Image: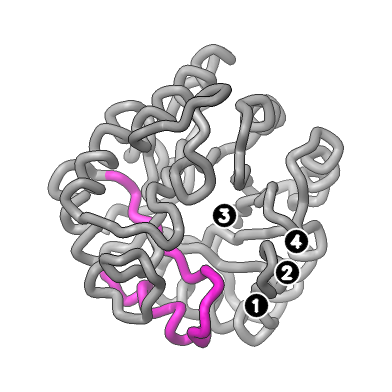
Amino acid sequence: MRKVIISLAPVKAGTPVDAAELAKDVEKSVKAGAAMCHLHCRKPDGSLTPDISYMVDCFEEILKRTDVVVQASTGGVSDMNIAQRCNPLSYEKVESASLNGGSTNLGENVYINSFDDIRYCADAVYRRGILPETEVFDIGMLYNMELVKGEQPFAEPMLFNLVFGHKGGMQPTPEMLSAFRSFVPKDALWGVTHFGRDNWTFLAMAVAMGASVVRVGFEDSAYLAEGEAAEYNYQIVEKTAALIRAMGLETASPEEAREILHLKKK
């Protein structure tokens, strides 16, 4: 039976983060079907920072409770340079990390990821044996990654996160998903993020089209049902898992996710 990885991004940008409470929510989320946890490097007040200490504290609390796949972000709109954005890679338990595939308008902000930035991050993850999850906000970014892959060593398998819903980027429509998906390299894995999600149909469509990963969580949307926001991330994971199972598929455990992604637990 095909297994789908649920990736959890549990922290909404700019909101305070309590490590212990976050760990409880992630633990319940893993029991509900999540396999990966995606965290940015934040201060307790929720602001982005180059100091990885609180991110490490959060992951250590989480790993006391569950063996979830550890994924660190190297992104987020801030005034940090790419070296500072890659500081989380020095946390020895990071198994996967985001790698941004190019520059884009992100809401009212310009999200800058130059080719030099892409090469720097790609090299940093490769040297550490970390699997990059390449965040792509438009089709041209897939071409960017083909160029970088041809210039320097790159981790295999390639994993793309097709991001939809941001103002300035691809929108969550069947036509855009079909077009985006058609340009993903045949030997690559792919998944989706639906930012600002206000329904479940787009995620279902992505799973039906072969997505290996679906990302959910408060970073992207707290939507649970019409007029109802989730109080905890695990409630969103429960509904995502139910959707996957209703399609005759199954959610991947953390260990199964490592097998799918060719990861070795650190």
Question: Reading the chain from its start, which is encountered first: label 4 or label 3?
Answer: 4
Compared with residue 232, is residue 128 higher up or lower down, i.e. above or below? Answer: below
Please name the residue shown 60% across and 57% down the image: 158
> Picture coordinates of residue 30 (x, y %)?
31, 35
Task: Identify the residue under disc 4.
Answer: 142
Mark nearest the camera among 1 and 2 is: 2
Circles 1 and 2 in contact, beta carbons < 8 Å = yes
> Picture coordinates of residue 51 (x, y %)?
30, 80
Mark nearest the camera among 4 and 3 is: 4
Between residue 51 and residue 160, name the one nearer to us: 51
Is residue 262 located in the magenta-colored stretch of the structure? no
Task: Identify the residue under disc 3.
Answer: 157
| Residue 44 visible in the current orientation | yes
Question: Reading the chain from its start, which is encountered first: label 2 or label 4?
Answer: 2
Residue flagged by tag 4: what amino acid is it? Leu
Q: Helix, strand, or loop for circle 1?
A: loop
Mark pair 2, 4: CA separation = 13 Å
Q: Which residues are magenta?
A: 68-92
Mark pair 3, 2: CA separation = 25 Å
Residue flagged by tag 2: what amino acid is it? Thr
Q: Residues within 10 Å of mark 4 (few under 14, many from 20)?
A: many
Mark pair 1, 4: CA separation = 14 Å
Residue flagged by tag 1: what amino acid is it? Asn
Please name the residue shown 30% across and 70% down the image: 43
Mark pair 1, 2: CA separation = 8 Å
Mark nearest the camera among 1 and 3 is: 1
Mark nearest the camera among 3 and 2 is: 2
Mark pair 4, 3: CA separation = 14 Å
Task: Identify the residue under disc 1.
Answer: 113
Q: Residues within 10 Å of mark 1 (few under 14, many from 20)?
A: some
Q: Helix, strand, or loop for circle 4?
A: helix
